[in-house]
Image (cartoon, rainbow, N blue to C red):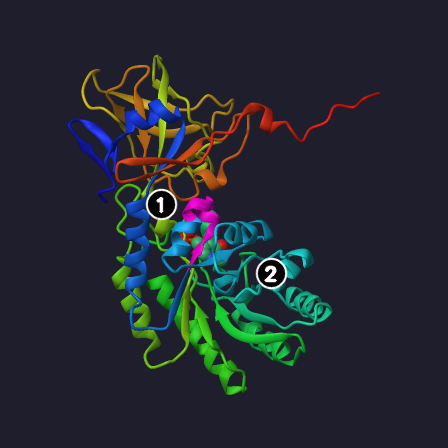
């Protein structure tokens, strides 16, 4: 990763010193590199060169319109999980014909919206969802393209909160039940069976769970096709991990090669739904040290970013590398890096060696995925600005929220 590098003792985003970005946009601010986003997409896509495929970027990882637009221009499709994400993709110039709609709680209104837009495929996660989709499509005089999301019951060996492919997870249809549901789908008058789908979890650092899942899915494909139902595409989901600390996730080329080897001569179109792997390491969160507090047992670095800006440490006990934007100055000490929110869970990093003084800038790395998109307004904190760096230029791709915006929809009783 060369998007964020030290030059002359200061961390830069592409050509720009981060101190310039902080001076212009204040902090906390998410900073993304256009070059890193582009490279990640191109590298991922290139692994499947020569195979009919569609990379559907998983919008929930980072749903900023500028990022969606950038991927759309690179030829991406999109994996969405709500009507809101559908609206975003369309507003960003994405092609509805390249959208797959995942998620286990699709409302009738969301189904109508997606049928109207003409999406590529609904990834259906249960029998009642299939029946509802058939009814909604029928009322509109349309046919809904459908994949069943099957749950292959494999252990993704990742954090339990982001593991989705085990029997006891709420996601998808159990493999044993999927065959009967495919037969039902094929018999419904407003459903077109087009594919099969699975997604077993996020931040996977090994290939074997992907391949185990694929074995089970392919066995099901054989069974379904033997019954005369054609599967046109295979959606292998997302989930490739990134390096936050010392993980060694699979290289994109190895991932693609292993999957292509499993498929052998089978002729269907491949769909993938990567999120984190495309954006995670293309962004960082820039924050300012407000106070240093030296306690008897611990030192605290209190910064102006918090769990509402970056929830992953509080939610998953996730690790994000943190470093001072400028080298030198103070003595190195070990700090708890914490935000100002009134929760003891509001930390960004434990036991970090940092040479810092109040007013210094810190960079929190690997914050491009599930950072801004999971942020909230807890403690009535306006959400951070987002900036995309492109060479020597910084573009504000989302303005910092203002406090009046936060309560603009609220009303006081008048009697
Ligand atoms: C979240 C999600 C993804 C993306 O996962 P990453 O780990 O970010 O690649 C893909 N597909 C589905 C159905 C998801 O819920």
267 horizontally vs 197: left or right: left
Residue 373 image position (x, y, % from top left) = 48, 41
Distance (Cα) linking label 2 and label 1: 28 Å
In the picture as drawn, the residue positioned furthest to the right comes out as 415
- The image quadrant where one finds the C terminus is top right
Residue receiving disc 1: 280
Give residue 114's mark.
2
Along the line of sight, which residue is nearer the eye, 255 or 53?
Answer: 53
How many marks overall?
2
Which of pointers 2 and 1 lies earlier in the amino acid sequence?
A: 2
Residue 225 lies within the magenta run: no
Query: Label 2 crowding class (10 Å Cα cut-off): few <14, some 14-19, many 20+?
Result: many
Query: Label 1 crowding class (10 Å Cα cut-off): few <14, some 14-19, many 20+?
Result: many
Residue 172 image position (x, y, % from top left) = 55, 63
The residue range painted magenta reads 56-67
Along the line of sight, which residue is nearer the eye, 352 or 251?
Answer: 251
Residue 342 image position (x, y, % from top left) = 51, 22
Establish whether ligand 1 lies closer than 8 Å to the Cβ of label 2. Answer: no
Residue 239 visible here: no
> Disc 1 on helix, strand or loop?
helix
In the picture as drawn, the residue positioned furthest to the left comes out as 8
Q: What residue lies at 31% left-to-right and 72% top-to-bottom?
A: 260
């Amino acid at each position: 990763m060369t998007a964020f590098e030290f030059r002359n003792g200061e961390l830069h985003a592409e050509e720009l010193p981060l101190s310039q970005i902080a001076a212009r946009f204040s902090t906390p601010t998410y900073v993304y590199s256009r070059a890193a986003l582009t490279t990640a997409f191109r590298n991922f896509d290139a692994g499947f060169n020569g195979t009919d495929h569609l990379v559907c970027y998983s919008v929930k990882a980072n749903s900023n319109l500028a990022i969606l637009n950038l991927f759309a221009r690179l030829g991406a499709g999109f994996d969405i999980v709500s009507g809101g994400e559908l609206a975003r993709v369309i507003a960003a110039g994405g092609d509805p014909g390249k959208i797959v709609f995942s998620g286990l709680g699709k409302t009738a209104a969301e189904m109508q919206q997606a049928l109207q837009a003409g999406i590529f495929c609904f990834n259906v996660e249960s029998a009642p969802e299939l029946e509802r989709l058939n009814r909604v499509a029928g009322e509109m005089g349309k046919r809904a393209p459908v994949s069943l999301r099957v749950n292959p019951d494999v252990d993704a060996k990742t954090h339990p909160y982001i593991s989705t492919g085990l029997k006891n997870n709420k996601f998808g249809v159990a493999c044993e039940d999927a065959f009967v549901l495919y037969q039902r789908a094929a018999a419904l008058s407003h459903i077109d069976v087009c594919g099969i789908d699975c997604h077993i979890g996020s931040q996977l650092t090994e290939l074997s769970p992907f391949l185990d899942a694929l074995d089970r899915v392919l066995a099901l494909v054989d069974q379904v096709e033997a019954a005369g139902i054609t599967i046109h595409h295979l959606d292998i989901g997302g989930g490739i991990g990134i390096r936050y600390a010392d993980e060694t996730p699979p290289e994109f080329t190895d991932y693609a090669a292993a999957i292509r080897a499993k498929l052998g001569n089978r002729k269907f179109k491949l769909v993938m739904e990567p999120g984190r792997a495309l954006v995670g390491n293309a962004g960082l969160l820039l924050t300012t040290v407000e106070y240093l507090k030296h306690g008897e047992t611990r030192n605290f670095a209190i910064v102006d970013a918090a769990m509402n800006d970056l929830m992953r440490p509080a939610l998953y006990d996730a690790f994000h590398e943190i470093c001072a934007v400028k080298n030198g100055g103070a003595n190195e000490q070990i700090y708890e890096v914490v935000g100002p929110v009134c929760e003891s869970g509001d930390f960004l990093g434990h036991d970090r060696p940092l040479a810092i003084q109040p007013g210094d800038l810190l960079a929190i790395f690997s914050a491009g995925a599930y950072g801004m998109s999971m942020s909230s307004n807890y403690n009535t904190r306006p959400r951070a600005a987002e900036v995309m760096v492109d060479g020597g230029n910084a573009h504000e791709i989302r303005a910092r929220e203002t406090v009046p915006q936060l309560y603009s929809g609220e009303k006081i009783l008048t009697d």
